[in-house]
Each structure stands twice: as structure tokens, then as C-alpha cells.
Image: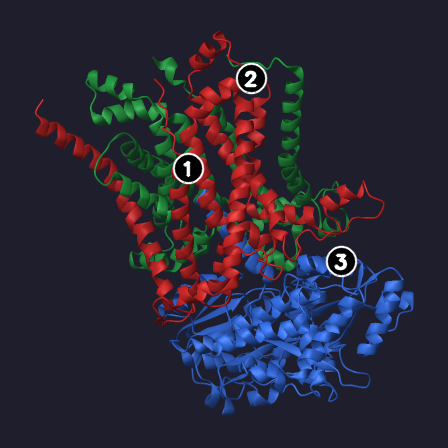
């Protein structure tokens, strides 16, 4: 299928670069893991990347899990992340498709509107957002957070997907119409599936953003039972900073990282196995 | 076909695909952001119930504030550095992990995304350690080659510390663009490459004549995205590593905004900075779009 | 990507904010103390109010308290006691490390809590006064008695700061900046503990000759070195008259241009030019600098009295904290203690001011002095004899300095946020030789002039 490098020297160099980079990215993860089972003294007095001494403090994890009710936060985060991502991907795709493939008055302006929202630091919008959500009674609600998060992902989604949609062949649409498909049909049955790699990529990035999102969460949710995982971790981090409990801090970080990593690994296969447009024909 | 109906159907379709998104967007993003920017015309501490309208005073102050100019310079330095660094590496990795059929490609694809997955705080803490003068990795590594222990304070240069913020920014940013390009490359039909092979075209040739044009949209998108997120988001890395110091030499607009709005109680001024970030981003986008104009090639 | 960066911004921002602790609070130090578990909670019995001062309190009462280095043990306890003493009152606790951010919209929207503990980044008492958010307590405080029947003003070790002659907040926690060293190390190496600037320089030379770096500080948070070295030095050079600092806080340019300021700055220059300052200082944060100090890589560190508590989990065996509030006085000169306090106040728009005032009377009682010291590891601003309590020894030592009539005790001074930042940036630049002391003064006075327009 794909080409193999003929020149062994080139192959070696490429491999070397890949491996070096691989080490540089795995290292912090390993470091986080190692440090999550250390105690404070080890953390600072030894080189931070040294191996932890036995006994490994696995109870850093249980300490973190039990003292802070992680199952609730996990569920909250899960619901909110999945909800926002699905809604955002769908809405972005719809708008991006139309902006990319159809000419109409105002389409450029609309695109510009979405893009320019990404150019403003969101911190400025926090206070007005709070008052808005308050007046709508959406403070401390999961649905409120979902709405806000979805909206925050739209601009980026449109931006990215327009690029994907633009590069799909025009003939596909024309063919679908000739076959009698409606506009909607064309979109849902033909264009959407073809842009799957793009959609999945967007989905992953969205999941990542929302899963880790924290500032908006802190401001819009002050009922601790409604906290999402990162908000709770933020509170923990702040507390632990003062108590300099590094081990549990890293354990907590690890607990947030692992689910996302797993999700990514599963889904990146989807991207990899991507649908080749030509093969469809 | 009655043109009236067809046009009507078309418009309804377009509207139905635009409006729901726009409604969400308008309420939960546009409205708060506009309101936030509106504060740029006020003198407001960010805490008090009262604000004074001051018109363009904040902007006038900004013009005369040398730190703002420094920050803008730093921002664009990071933008340029990141675009070059990220695009070269991300493209390289994307191509290497899709076109060359390495057995471990899937594995590498997975792990290269790790920096994007781990919280940026960890990235900052990690690189802080690397740069630590006493126990940091960089000095330890360099000391292997020197007689005396190297104790350079990497984040303490009076003027050039900003250079040190480039590596973590690039390192943490590549993963996303890599998978974007991978997705784009995956969409290129194999047949093109096969045809090129048959015609005897080499790897390099194939790269420039097939791959690049067909992923040009994504490259454009990536470059613009890097620019926008840097102007908006390099606050993170800067804040964790140096908080804009030493002595404001690594300030970027985002960090200065935060400092002003939330630490020095000049929210209006911070909002004005936000305004400027937006304007600069817009201008830069337009410039970049012009420079990168190249018809997006559709596959046929 | 933007949102990811945004999320990261958030995490980082809030982490950074917490890293600084109470950075924005009038040079108040980050109260990063370790909440000490069990050992400090024993002994001193809970103070019981002699009799409820006020009529039965009813309604709702909300308390906002930031949880930082002092922990929340004392708050939880004293609030529980207050609730028990006032069963008809619905007390709501809003406390946590992020509480200032979370409550901010309430203050902006005009529905703040009744009672607030002003500490942590994001709250600044001077700013709150300027924003007209705090209740004027000047008249009330004149006659206010605590639940033991004593006048509150009598038992305050440090009086409340005045803003234009008015009082809006009362100091609860009293802390002091100063210089720390490891007594055990000094004994072992035969180094003399410093008593004034000359002896400080002399012993630093010796330390340097012995291969250890004399002085480390955190360049990321220059208010440490300003609080422990610069401001006391200014006072010493100003004939022990601390009103110069108050003039600086009132944005009077002449104060900054006084020769005392230059003298003080030159003392820092002396440390720099003699190579006493650890070169790593400029880029590290307080925790890093403290760790190096604990590992005896550096001999002296400017810090606040929360230091031993904050680092208690990391203090190696045998380490003994030596402390003196200032080293910048001339031989024979007085020790200058630059205090930092954390205060409590009532919101101007509080709904239940009676309950808030009653709470003030409740917490400013003698018994709470010891209870605070034990549960938070820091000195209380309540004059109480804590020598019999289980407070940590460094707290008792500090209390000795603070009550010694020969010590010049500087009351809390909150500078304007912009001027404060300018002073911090300038000191940083001074320590790495990018500017001269004269330029320090010029930079800062430029900002002062701008701010006082």
C-alpha cells in the first residue's frame, strides 16, 4: 500500500528522529507516574526523575480517590464532555459544510464572525457569562455547562471542518443529486461519512478541551456535588500546593490523564484506518 | 424544475444548517465576549459594582506603555517560531507515520499526542525542571561536557528568556497538528501515489506535487490556528514558567492582560488589551491568508 | 486548539494564582503553611464564651474565607462554635482555595456574603475599600467589646490599618517577615548568627568561603525580598521611622525620593556585588528557594513566619530554624519587624450586619489567640499569652520579638497594586544588574506619579 523507503540510511535517520521524539514525549508521562508514588522527601531530595523508593505509595491514589469523591466528578465530567462534544461536532459540521460548499450572501461574513471569536481571550467574557447564566437559571446545572461548552467549541469546529469539506470532490455531491438525494440526504449519507477523519479529529480535540476545562467550570458551578473532574482537581491542586503533597498531586493528575489517553488511542485507529475517497467509487 | 422552488429549498436548507449553530453561538459566546470587550471603554477594577466610562483612555495608555510593545514583540516572536517549528516537525511526523508504512507507526501516532493530553500545567512544571539551574536536566546534560558544573539560569536572562519558552510551546503543540495532517493525508486516495510511482516519481517529488497541494487547506488552517492560539493562549506557558518576568521581559499580551485585569485591578485596561489581541489577530490572519493564497485543490 | 489552550490557561492561571498564594494582598505573604495534623490540635480547650453579648441572632449569615497556608481547621472550628452559640442563626460557610474567584461575581453583582476574610490572590483590602465594598467600622470599633467583655481595640496586637482615617478591616493574623537560617548548620560550621548588617555581611563572607551560597530568594515573587530586606532597610535608614513606608503607600513621591530608599537599595546592591545572592534566585519560585534552603545549599532566606509550617513535611531531621525580623540595621540599631496581616471585614452590602459584628466579637477573644496559633501554626493578632499553649516554638520566638519594646514593629501597609508591581519588577532588575538604584527610584516614581493623577 504505502511506499517503503528504499534508502536504508534515510530510513535510519527517520527512525532515529522518531525514537528521540518518542522518548521526549513519553518521559513526562513516566515521570508523572514515578512521582505519583513518591513521598515529598523523595520528590525534592533526589533528582526528580529518579526511581521511587519502595514502598511505592500506591495509597496516594486511594487517598486522592476517597478523600475527594471522584466517582461523582467522573460521571459529571463524562456526561458533560460527551454531551458537549456530540452537539458541537454536529452543529459545527452542519455549518461548516454549508459554508464550504455553498455560495450565499453573507457566508464570508459568517465565517469571519466565527473565526474572530477565537481571537478574543475568553477570560474577558467570564463575568458577563456568569450574569447571563444566572439570569437564565443555569448556574450549577449540567445542561448549562453543556450549552456553554458546546458554544465554545463551535468556532474552532467550523474553522477546522471548513477545510476538510472544501477538499472533498464536488462530483460526489453532483452524483448524489443525480441519484435523487435531497440536500439533507447528501449531507448525512455522503459528505458526513466521508469527512469522518476530520470529524473524529475534531471530536478528540473537543473531548480533550472539555475534559480538562476548568475556569468556566469553577465560575459557573459552586455546588461541589456538581463539580466536574478538572474543577475538583483544581481545588485539590490549590490545597495541595499549600501542603506540598506532591505525590498525591501527581496521582490526581494521572487519574485525569489516563481516560483521555485511552480514548485517544482507541480513536486514533479510526483516523488511521481512514476512508479513502477514491476507494468508494 | 421551477427555479423558485429549487432556490427556496436551497435557502431553507442553508438556513437550517446555519441557524441552530448560530443561535447557540450568539447567546453563549458572542454576547458575553462582546460584553467583555465593552469593558475596554471603562475604568473598572474588576471587583467593584461601579465603572466609569473613559472612552479611549485605556487605549491611549496602552500606546504609551512600553510593556505592551514588548509583549506584542514577544507574541509575534513566538508566533513565528512556533509556526516554523511546529509545521516542519508536524508535517514530517505526519508524512513519516502515514506514507512510509512503518510497522510502529500506530504506536508513534499514539504517543506523539501525549503532550497535548497532559495538562499544560505538567508541561510547564516539567520544563521548569528542565531549565532549573541547580537540578535541571539541561544543565546536568551540558555539564557532562564541561569541567565545571553548568549553572546557567535559563529563565533568568534579562532580555532573551523568551527564547527559552519556544521549545516547550512547540513540544506541547505539535501533536494536534500532526494528527490533523495525518487525517488530511489519509484522505488522499492511494491511487494518486500509485500513479506517481508508476511514472517513476520519487518520494520528494510526490511529497511536493501530491501531498502538499492536497493538504494545503489543512496546512493553511494549521498555520492560522497556531497564530491565533499563540496570540491568545501563550499566556499559559508564560505564566507558569515566568509569570511574565524577569522584570516583564517575557510578557505576552495574554499574560499582561491577566496581570492587569486580575492582579492589578485594571479590568478595563485588560479588556482593551483583549481588544488589541483581536484586532492584531484579524490583521495577521488576513495577511497570512493573502500570503498563502493557493487554490485548494479538490480531488477528482 | 484555542479552547484547549483556554482550558490550560485556566488550569495554569488558577494554579499560578494558588502558587502565589496571597500574592496580590498588600505584600501579605503567601500563607503556604502546611496544615499540621494531629499534634497541634490537642491541649488548649475550646474557649467558651462567657455569655452571649447580643440578643439572639436570627436569619442567614454567610462567611467567605480563603483557605491557604493557614488551612481551614480553625475556621471550621470557630464557625461551628459560633453556630452552636447561635442556634437560631443559619450560618453558611463559603470557604476554599478558590473561593475568591468563585465569589467574585457576587461582589460585582452587589450580593456579597456578610463576612469576609481577606486573604489570597484576587482580594486586596485597599482595592475593596476604594471600590466601596466594605462596611465602615470606625465608629463601631471604638466601643466594640468581645465576648469576654474586653474592648477589641485593647487586645489587638496591631491596630487596624486606616484608610483616610477610617477603619474597614481588622487584622486577624499577625505575621512577620524576616531572615531565616539553620541554627544547627551555623553551630556546626561555627558561623555567627547575624544581629545587624555588618555582622550579616561578615558571616556571609565566611559562608561563601566555606563553599555555600549565602543568600537565596525567590525572583518570581520579589515581595519576599522587598518585605524582608528592603522595607526594613528603608525604615532603619530613616531613623527607625516607618511613616516613610506609609507615605509610600499613600503615593507620595517625596517618600520614594528620600535618601533612606537609596541607602536601602544599596544594601541589596552590596549583597549582589559581593556575590552573596544565589544566581538561581531570579527564576525560581518560593517553594524551590525554600527547598534549596532546607537542603543547606543556601544559608539565608528571606521569608515569613509561616515558613517552618509550610515546609514541615520537608524539613530534614536536625534542622533548627533561626529567625530575626531584620538584618539591615546598623550595628547597635533596632531590629525592624515588618509585619503582614490578614484581615477580616464586613461587606457594605451585607444582609446580616448584626450577625457579622457578633462574629467579630466572637473571634477576637483571648482564647482564640491560642486556638488560632495551634490550628493554623501562625501568630494571631490577638494579644494573648501563648507561651503556655501548644503553638510551635518559632511562633513563640517571633512573639517575643514582636512584643519587645526595642523592636520597631511596622504595622501592615498595603501599597497600591501598580506601585507594588513596579517595586517588585525593579528589585528583580536590580538583583540581576539591569538597573541601578537611581533607576529603581525613577521607575517607581514614574508609576507613582501616574497613579496619583
Q: Within the image, what quadrant is residue B111 found in?
A: top right
* Residue behind mark 1: B291
Judging depth in this view, the residue of C60 and A244 nearest the camera is A244
Indicate the chain on which mark 2 is placed.
B
**Which marked residue is nearer to the observer: mark 1 or mark 2?**
1
* Residue behind mark 2: B101
* Residue behind mark 3: C292
Indicate the chain on which mark 1 is placed.
B
Taking the spot 56% from the left edge, 17% from the top edge, the residue there is B101
Q: In this view, does A208 lie above or below C156?
A: above
Taking the spot 52% from the left edge, 27% from the top edge, the residue there is B94
Image position, residue B165 (x, y; %): 60, 48
Work out how far the residue at label 3 is from the one at label 2, CA to CA, in angstroms.
50 Å
**Which marked residue is nearer to the observer: mark 1 or mark 3?**
1
Chain drawn in red: B
Locate residue B129 relative to residue B275 in the image: left or right.
right
Q: In the displayed orientation, state which residue is furthest to the top.
A: B198
Q: Within the image, what quadrant is residue A100 found in?
A: top left
Q: In this view, does B61 lie above or below A42?
A: below
Task: Name the element at disc 2.
Answer: loop
Chain A drawn colour: green
Amino acid at each position: 500500500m504505502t511506499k517503503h523507503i528504499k534508502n536504508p540510511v534515510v530510513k535510519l535517520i527517520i527512525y532515529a528522529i522518531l525514537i528521540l521524539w518518542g522518548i521526549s514525549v513519553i518521559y513526562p508521562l513516566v515521570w508523572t507516574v514515578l512521582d505519583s508514588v513518591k513521598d515529598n522527601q523523595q520528590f525534592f531530595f533526589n533528582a526528580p526523575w529518579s526511581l521511587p523508593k519502595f514502598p511505592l505509595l500506591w495509597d496516594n491514589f486511594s487517598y486522592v480517590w476517597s478523600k475527594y469523591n471522584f466517582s461523582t466528578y467522573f460521571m459529571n465530567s463524562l456526561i458533560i464532555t460527551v454531551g458537549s462534544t456530540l452537539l458541537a461536532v454536529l452543529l459545527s459540521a452542519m455549518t461548516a459544510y454549508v459554508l464550504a460548499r455553498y455560495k450565499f450572501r453573507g457566508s464570508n461574513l459568517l465565517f469571519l464572525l466565527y473565526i474572530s471569536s477565537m481571537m478574543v481571550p475568553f477570560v474577558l467574557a467570564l463575568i458577563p457569562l456568569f450574569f447571563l447564566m444566572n439570569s437564565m437559571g443555569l448556574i450549577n446545572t449540567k445542561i448549562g455547562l453543556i450549552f456553554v461548552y458546546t458554544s465554545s467549541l463551535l468556532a474552532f469546529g467550523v474553522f477546522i471542518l471548513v477545510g476538510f469539506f472544501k477538499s472533498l470532490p464536488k462530483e460526489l455531491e453532483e452524483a448524489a443529486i443525480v441519484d435523487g438525494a435531497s440536500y439533507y440526504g447528501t449531507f448525512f449519507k455522503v459528505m458526513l461519512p466521508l469527512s469522518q477523519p476530520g470529524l473524529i479529529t475534531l471530536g478528540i480535540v473537543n473531548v480533550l478541551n472539555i475534559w480538562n476545562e476548568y475556569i468556566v467550570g469553577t465560575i459557573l458551578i459552586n455546588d461541589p456535588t456538581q463539580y466536574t473532574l478538572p474543577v475538583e482537581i483544581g481545588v485539590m491542586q490549590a490545597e495541595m500546593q499549600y501542603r506540598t503533597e506532591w505525590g498525591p498531586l501527581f496521582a490526581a493528575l494521572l487519574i485525569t490523564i489516563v481516560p483521555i489517553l485511552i480514548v485517544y488511542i482507541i480513536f486514533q485507529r479510526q483516523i488511521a484506518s481512514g476512508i479513502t475517497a477514491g476507494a468508494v467509487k | 424544475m421551477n427555479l423558485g422552488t429549487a432556490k427556496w429549498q436551497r435557502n431553507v436548507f442553508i438556513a437550517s444548517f446555519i441557524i441552530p449553530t448560530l443561535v447557540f453561538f450568539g447567546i453563549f459566546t458572542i454576547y458575553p465576549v462582546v460584553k467583555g470587550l465593552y469593558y475596554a471603554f471603562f475604568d473598572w477594577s474588576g471587583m467593584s459594582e461601579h465603572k466609569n466610562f473613559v472612552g479611549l483612555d485605556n487605549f491611549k495608555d496602552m500606546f504609551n506603555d512600553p510593556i505592551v510593545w514588548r509583549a506584542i514583540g514577544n507574541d509575534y516572536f513566538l508566533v513565528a517560531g512556533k509556526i516554523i517549528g511546529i509545521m516542519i516537525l508536524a508535517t514530517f511526523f505526519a508524512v513519516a507515520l502515514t506514507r512510509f508504512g512503518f510497522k510502529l507507526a500506530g504506536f508513534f501516532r499514539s504517543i506523539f499526542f501525549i503532550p497535548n493530553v497532559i495538562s499544560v500545567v505538567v508541561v510547564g512544571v516539567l520544563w521548569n525542571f528542565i531549565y532549573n539551574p541547580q537540578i535541571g536536566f539541561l544543565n546536568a546534560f551540558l555539564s557532562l561536557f564541561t569541567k565545571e558544573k553548568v549553572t546557567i539560569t535559563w529563565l533568568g536572562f534579562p532580555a532573551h528568556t523568551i527564547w527559552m519558552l519556544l521549545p516547550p510551546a512547540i513540544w506541547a503543540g505539535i501533536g494536534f497538528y500532526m494528527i490533523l495532517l495525518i487525517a488530511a493525508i489519509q484522505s488522499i486516495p492511494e491511487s494518486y501515489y500509485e500513479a506517481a510511482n508508476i511514472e517513476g516519481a520519487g518520494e520528494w517529488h510526490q511529497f511536493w506535487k501530491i501531498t502538499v497541494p492536497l493538504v494545503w487547506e489543512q496546512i493553511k488552517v494549521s498555520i492560522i490556528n497556531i497564530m491565533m492560539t499563540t496570540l491568545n493562549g501563550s499566556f499559559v506557558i508564560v505564566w507558569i514558567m515566568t509569570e511574565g518576568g524577569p522584570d516583564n521581559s517575557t510578557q505576552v499580551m495574554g499574560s499582561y492582560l491577566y496581570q492587569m485585569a486580575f492582579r492589578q485591578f485594571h479590568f478595563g485596561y485588560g479588556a482593551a488589551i483583549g481588544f488589541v489581541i483581536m484586532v492584531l489577530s484579524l490583521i495577521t490572519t488576513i495577511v497570512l491568508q493573502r500570503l498563502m493564497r493557493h487554490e485548494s485543490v479538490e480531488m477528482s | 486548539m484555542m479552547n484547549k489552550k483556554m482550558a490550560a490557561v485556566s488550569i495554569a492561571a488558577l494554579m499560578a494564582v494558588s502558587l502565589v498564594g496571597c500574592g496580590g494582598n498588600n505584600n501579605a505573604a503567601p500563607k503556604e503553611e502546611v496544615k499540621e495534623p494531629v499534634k497541634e490540635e490537642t491541649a488548649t480547650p475550646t474557649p467558651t464564651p462567657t455569655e452571649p453579648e447580643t440578643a439572639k441572632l436570627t436569619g442567614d449569615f454567610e462567611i467567605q474565607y480563603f483557605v491557604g497556608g493557614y488551612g481551614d481547621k480553625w475556621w471550621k472550628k470557630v464557625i461551628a462554635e459560633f453556630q452552636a452559640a447561635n442556634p437560631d442563626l443559619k450560618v453558611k460557610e463559603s470557604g476554599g482555595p478558590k473561593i475568591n474567584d468563585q465569589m467574585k461575581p457576587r461582589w460585582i453583582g452587589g450580593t456579597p456574603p456578610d463576612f469576609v476574610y481577606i486573604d489570597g490572590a484576587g482580594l486586596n483590602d485597599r482595592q475593596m475599600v476604594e471600590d466601596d465594598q466594605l462596611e465602615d467600622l470606625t465608629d463601631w470599633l471604638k466601643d466594640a467589646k468581645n465576648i469576654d467583655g474586653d474592648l477589641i481595640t485593647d487586645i489587638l496586637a496591631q491596630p487596624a490599618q486606616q484608610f483616610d482615617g477610617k477603619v474597614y478591616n481588622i487584622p486577624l493574623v499577625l505575621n512577620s517577615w524576616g531572615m531565616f537560617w539553620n541554627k544547627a548548620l551555623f553551630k556546626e560550621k561555627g558561623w555567627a548568627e547575624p544581629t545587624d548588617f555588618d555582622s550579616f555581611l561578615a558571616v556571609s563572607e565566611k559562608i561563601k568561603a566555606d563553599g555555600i551560597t549565602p543568600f537565596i530568594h525567590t525572583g518570581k515573587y520579589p515581595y519576599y525580598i522587598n518585605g524582608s530586606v528592603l522595607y526594613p532597610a528603608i525604615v532603619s535608614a530613616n531613623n527607625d521611622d516607618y511613616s516613610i513606608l506609609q507615605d509610600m503607600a499613600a503615593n507620595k513621591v517625596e517618600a520614594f525620593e528620600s535618601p533612606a530608599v537609596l541607602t536601602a537599595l544599596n544594601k541589596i546592591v552590596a549583597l549582589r556585588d559581593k556575590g552573596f545572592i544565589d544566581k538561581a534566585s531570579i527564576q525560581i519560585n518560593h517553594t524551590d528557594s525554600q527547598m534549596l534552603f532546607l537542603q543547606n545549599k543556601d544559608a539565608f532566606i528571606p521569608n515569613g513566619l509561616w515558613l517552618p509550617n509550610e515546609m514541615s513535611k520537608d524539613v530534614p531531621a536536625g534542622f533548627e530554624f533561626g529567625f530575626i525580623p531584620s538584618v539591615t540595621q546598623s550595628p547597635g540599631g533596632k531590629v525592624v519587624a515588618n509585619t503582614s496581616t490578614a484581615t477580616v471585614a464586613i461587606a457594605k452590602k451585607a444582609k446580616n450586619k448584626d450577625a457579622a459584628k457578633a462574629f467579630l466579637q466572637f473571634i477576637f477573644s483571648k482564647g482564640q489567640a491560642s486556638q488560632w496559633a495551634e490550628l493554623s501554626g501562625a501568630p494571631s493578632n490577638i494579644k494573648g499569652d501563648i507561651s503556655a499553649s501548644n503553638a510551635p516554638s518559632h511562633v513563640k520566638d517571633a512573639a517575643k520579638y514582636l512584643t519587645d519594646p526595642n523592636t520597631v514593629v511596622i504595622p501592615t501597609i498595603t501599597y497600591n497594586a501598580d506601585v507594588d508591581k513596579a517595586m517588585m519588577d525593579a528589585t528583580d532588575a536590580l538583583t540581576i544588574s539591569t538597573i541601578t538604584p537611581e533607576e529603581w527610584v525613577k521607575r517607581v516614581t514614574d508609576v507613582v506619579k501616574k497613579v496619583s493623577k
